[in-house]
């Protein structure tokens, strides 16, 4: 099977697996929010932020380096090198993962204090072994991604999500009799168990390949492979560590700026009108005109636990495109086939736009019913609605970053992300403390940040790689189709609510009509043609 066919097949396999795992993740978080509430979700999010920071420091760039090296060696028919790459990478990442887990476990109190949430220490410790399991599992995922075989990655993702769902929920229920920080720690332990099982599955799937490749000799030494991995990974680790540290700083800034808000009686009344029906934490606001620590935690928990959970569903699914195209583009460039690299990038960008635009429309129009459907809590509907443009920016940015990385442009996406994060931090400092905006200031800052990143990435792809996307068919026509879809859905939703007398049924019916409208518009505008569908079916 050709790389083009593998790219299309692999992309759809990963999209389906990611969709399943994200849905299972949402299924996990929905009942979890009833147990943890906003306070517990804030603790959960804090622990996860520390985990992501340390994991990024340990593994960032390594996955890309391994898959890129495997793709290049296979393109040159060097099968022995691939086995050597896996063996060397496993030893390297096992040591790094063990170190990361130890730092996270023994530094739990420090990290919790730095995040202004001492209650998160137990959850941080419970999550710490995941660093080791993810680091080891990443080697085998990267190996198969380099082969443009996404099935093992997909299988491990679904298994991890299933185990996390059942183990995390069972432990959360068991620990619910204790303090909230213990309950959150129990819930997050499900992630650790899920990662352990997923890594065991990946190793089991790799063993037949290991035996098959054992007969091939490798010319490169372990030292040379480590240096090759380091050449890609070290800049990525540095950049990702800085980015993760800035993300933690961003969370700290948001929460500290929330505590600095000084309301007027009028703005306090407006705030209470919006949120007082969801919690009693703001009952003293008219007297103090300031948010309490618990009130600020609740507000951030509503944003991170509800709005961002839904936001990351489509974002996580679309991230599979970057994973799929990186080895294809890297392999094509290794053989000096620039036309194939440009073709793959164009197809991936079009798929991204076709998928991301209707998702953004759904968030913009139906944030409240979506939150009610999933969490029976629409406190963060305004936040989710305002995140709609950001969804589009993030999806496109993920893809452009993968394209740049595949071509060897490692540092440039980091610089762009750093610039975007500076905009985000500045925006949070200026906007979050505004009593009219409060947490909405963080959402506005996120939109500005990712718009800047997309703009810089797009310019780099055009100037450095000389890739030209078909603006009319890739951007304008899908945007027009999504706009018509949105207009039809906006007009239909209220009548559907009257007809069905049930918001869930009305949302499903409106969504179905919207999908049909979108598909029709794509054909009417020739954004998608019969020839393209035929080629897609053939896998070319």
Image: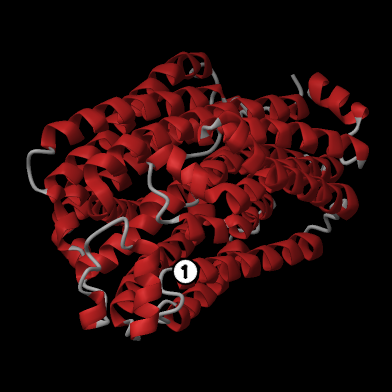
Task: Name the residue: 89% across, 35% down.
Answer: 523
Q: In this view, does 457 lie above or below 484?
A: below
Residue 272's quadrant in the figure?
bottom left
Q: In this view, does 465 lie above or below 446?
A: above
Q: Which of 156 and 58 is in front in this view?
A: 156
The x and y percentages for residue 76 are 70, 32
Q: In this view, does 261 lie above or below 19?
A: below
Task: Name the residue: 12% across, 37% down.
Answer: 175
**Residue furthest left in the image:** 178
Callout count: 1
Q: Name the residue under label 1.
A: 440
Q: In this view, does 383 lie above or below 507?
A: below
The quadrant the N terminus occupies is top right
Q: Nearer the viewer, residue 26 or 484?
A: 484
User: Does residue 249 show up?
Assistant: no
Q: Is residue 315 left or right of residue 373?
A: right
The x and y percentages for residue 284 are 20, 73
Secondary structure type for disc 1: helix
Q: How crowded is mark 1: few (under 14 residues within 10 Å), some or many (20 or more)?
A: many
Q: Which of 435 and 477 is in front in this view?
A: 435
The x and y percentages for residue 497 are 58, 37
Q: Nearer the viewer, residue 346 or 414?
A: 346
The x and y percentages for residue 211 are 46, 14
The quadrant the C terminus occupies is top right
């Amino acid at each position: 099977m050709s790389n083009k066919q593998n790219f299309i097949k692999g992309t759809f396999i990963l999209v389906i697996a990611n969709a399943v795992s994200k849905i299972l993740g949402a299924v996990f978080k929905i009942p979890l929010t009833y147990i943890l509430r906003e306070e517990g979700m804030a603790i959960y999010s804090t622990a996860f932020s520390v985990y992501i920071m340390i994991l990024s420091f340990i593994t960032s760039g390594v996955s890309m380096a391994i898959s890129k090296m495997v793709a290049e060696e296979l393109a040159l028919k060097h099968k022995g090198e691939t086995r050597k790459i896996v063996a060397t990478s496993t030893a390297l990442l096992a040591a790094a993962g063990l170190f990361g887990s130890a730092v996270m476990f023994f530094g739990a109190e420090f990290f919790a204090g730095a995040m202004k949430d001492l209650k998160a220490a137990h959850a941080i410790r419970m999550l710490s072994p995941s660093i080791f399991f993810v680091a080891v599992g990443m080697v085998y995922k990267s190996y198969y991604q380099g082969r443009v075989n996404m099935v093992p990655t997909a299988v491990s993702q679904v298994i991890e999500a299933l185990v996390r769902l059942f183990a995390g929920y069972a432990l959360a229920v068991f620990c619910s009799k204790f303090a909230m920080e213990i309950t959150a720690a129990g819930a997050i332990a499900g992630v650790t168990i899920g990662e352990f099982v997923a890594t065991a599955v990946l190793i089991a799937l790799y063993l037949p390949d290991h035996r098959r490749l054992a007969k091939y000799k490798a010319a490169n030494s372990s030292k040379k492979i480590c240096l090759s991995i380091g050449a890609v990974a070290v800049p990525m680790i540095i950049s990702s560590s800085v980015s993760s540290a800035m993300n933690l700083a961003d969370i700290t800034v948001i929460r500290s700026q929330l505590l600095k808000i000084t309301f007027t009686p009028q703005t306090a009344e407006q705030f209470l009108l919006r949120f007082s029906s969801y919690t009693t934490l703001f009952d003293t606001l008219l007297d103090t005109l300031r948010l309490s620590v618990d009130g600020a935690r609740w507000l951030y928990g509503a944003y991170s636990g509800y709005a961002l959970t839904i936001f990351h569903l489509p974002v996580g699914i679309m991230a599979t495109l970057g994973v799929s195209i990186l080895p294809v583009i890297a392999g094509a460039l290794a053989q000096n086939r620039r036309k194939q690299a440009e073709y793959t990038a164009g197809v991936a960008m079009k798929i991204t736009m076709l998928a991301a635009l209707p998702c953004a429309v759904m968030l913009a129009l139906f944030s409240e019913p979506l939150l009610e459907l999933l969490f029976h809590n629409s406190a963060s509907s305004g936040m989710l609605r305002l995140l709609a443009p950001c969804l589009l920016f993030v999806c496109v940015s993920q893809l452009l970053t993968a394209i740049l990385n595949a071509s060897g442009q490692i540092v440039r996406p980091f610089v762009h992300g750093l610039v975007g994060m500076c905009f985000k931090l500045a925006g949070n400092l200026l906007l979050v403390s505004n009593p009219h905006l409060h947490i909405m200031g963080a959402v506005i800052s996120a939109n500005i940040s990712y718009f800047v990143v997309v703009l810089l990435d797009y310019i780099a792809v055009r100037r450095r790689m000389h890739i030209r996307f078909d603006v009319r068919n890739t951007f304008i026509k899908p945007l027009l189709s999504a706009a018509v879809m949105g207009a039809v859905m906006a007009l239909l939703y209220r009548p559907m609510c009257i007809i069905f007398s049930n918001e869930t049924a009305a949302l499903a019916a409106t969504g179905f009509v919207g999908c049909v409208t979108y598909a029709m518009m794509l054909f009417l505008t020739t954004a998608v043609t019969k020839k393209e569908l035929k080629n897609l079916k053939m896998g070319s």
